[in-house]
Image (cartoon, helix red, strand yellow):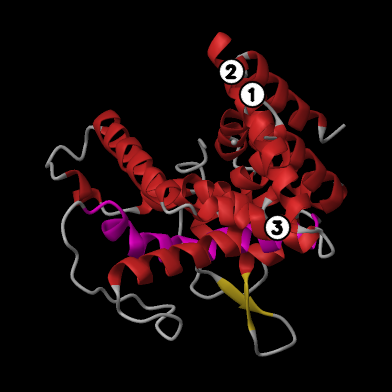
């Protein structure tokens, strides 16, 4: 019966219902929260959150959960973490959460939801520091280890994307640039270095590179817009959308995404011939053309 309030939250968000204040107060009371924490298994909570993330109104549902002060019942943390979790972190989790194909969409939304935790680590029985996102997936939500790995990889790629954005969108001759990673992998030739480092990011996170790029754009310094009107959120979002499209186009022009798909095919078909690969590329291109034609008709 206790988790029925979770159903109430989910249905309310999905169908646009407004929760009565009496219901909100009852759901948020300490007695109910204590009972939820004690009597509902983490597996059940994790399964419900999976359904929320995969549903049609994930942002609204998570907002309800925050409003009812249930976020920390859902996201249970280890006793000690570094740095300490800041006050209001649950609300921060919702800011980048409005991001998109089933499993990929699910993990993308989890990456956005848990973004405020990306720099926080903890220690188990060993001295090695472990991302707290790993704990949330495996211990708090009882989800697959591969889910945690994907989200952590997305988070790790954000700083790398942030360091390359100015060079990917620059229309001027760029002087040799320095980044804090990949120095030993390539020389200082700007076009070559930019291509190689961007390629490494795509190789690390594969189909999630657009998700990581979008989150990086949201984290990019506000003065990217060259305006003092930073309080105008719609203007900011429009500018950041333009920046996202510019970086996406720059990466597409590098041809790295096709190379990623080609590498994936080679790894999946180690005995495949060049002719087999060519047939696969033609078939993939034909499917893409049909899909784009269907979308244009709609």
Which quadrant holds the N terminus? top right
Query: Along the horizontal axis of the image, is 240 left or right of 273?
Result: left
* Most distant residue in the front direction: 275
Image marks 1 and 2: residues in contact by CB distance under 8 Å: yes
Is residue 253 positioned above or below 231 on the image? below
**From mark 1 to mark 2, how far is it between C-alphas?**
5 Å
Q: Nearer the viewer, residue 103 or 294?
A: 294
Residue underneath mark 3: 264
Q: Is residue 298 visible?
A: no
* Most distant residue in the bottom direction: 127
Provide residue 28's location: percent of width, then percent of height: 64, 37
Could you tell me which secondary element the residue under label 2 belongs to?
helix
Query: Along the horizontal axis of the image, is 265 left or right of 270?
Result: left
Provide residue 89's location: percent of width, then percent of height: 49, 53
- Residue 291, label in figure: 1
- Provide the major secondary structure of the magenta segment: helix
Residue underneath mark 2: 293
- Residue 143, label in figure: none
**Quadrant of residue 270 in the image?**
bottom right
**Quadrant of residue 291 in the image?**
top right
The residue sitting at 24% across, 31% down in the picture is 235
Magenta residues, start to end: 143-170
Q: Residues within 10 Å of mark 1 (few under 14, many from 20)?
A: few
* Most distant residue in the top direction: 298
Indicate whether residue 167 is drawn in magenta: yes
The residue sitting at 22% across, 54% down in the picture is 170
Query: Along the horizontal axis of the image, is 68 left or right of 47?
Result: left
Q: Nearer the viewer, residue 111 or 86?
A: 111
Provide residue 146's location: percent of width, then percent of height: 76, 60
**From mark 3 to mark 1, how far is it between C-alphas?**
22 Å
**From mark 2 to mark 3, how far is it between C-alphas?**
26 Å
Q: Residues within 10 Å of mark 3 (few under 14, many from 20)?
A: few
């Amino acid at each position: 019966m206790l988790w029925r309030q979770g159903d109430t939250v989910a249905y309310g968000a999905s169908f646009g219902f407004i929760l009565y204040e009496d219901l909100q107060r009852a759901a948020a009371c300490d007695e109910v929260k204590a009972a939820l924490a004690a009597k509902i298994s983490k597996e059940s909570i994790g399964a419900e959150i999976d359904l929320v993330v995969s549903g049609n109104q994930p942002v609204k549902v998570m907002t309800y959960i925050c409003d009812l002060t249930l976020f920390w019942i859902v996201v249970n943390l280890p006793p000690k973490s570094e740095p300490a979790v800041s006050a209001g972190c649950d609300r921060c989790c919702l800011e980048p959460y409005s991001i998109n194909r089933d499993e990929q969409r699910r993990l993308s939304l989890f990456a956005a939801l848990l973004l405020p935790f990306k720099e926080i680590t903890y220690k188990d029985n060993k001295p090695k520091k472990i991302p707290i996102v790993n704990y949330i997936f495996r211990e708090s939500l009882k989800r697959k280890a591969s889910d945690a790995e994907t989200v952590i990889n997305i988070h790790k790629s954000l700083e790398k994307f942030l360091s390359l954005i100015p060079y990917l969108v620059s229309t001027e001759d760029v002087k040799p640039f320095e980044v804090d990673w990949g120095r030993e992998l390539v020389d200082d030739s700007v076009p070559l270095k930019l291509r190689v480092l961007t390629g490494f990011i795509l190789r690390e996170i594969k189909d999630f590179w657009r998700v990581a790029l979008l989150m990086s754009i949201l984290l990019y310094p506000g003065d990217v817009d060259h305006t003092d009107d930073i309080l105008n959120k719609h203007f900011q979002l429009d500018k950041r959308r333009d920046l996202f499209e510019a970086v996406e186009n720059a990466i597409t022009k590098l041809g790295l995404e096709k190379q990623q798909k080609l590498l994936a095919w080679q790894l999946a078909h180690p005995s495949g011939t060049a002719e087999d690969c060519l047939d696969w590329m033609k078939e993939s291109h034909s499917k893409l053309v049909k899909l784009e034609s269907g979308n244009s008709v709609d």
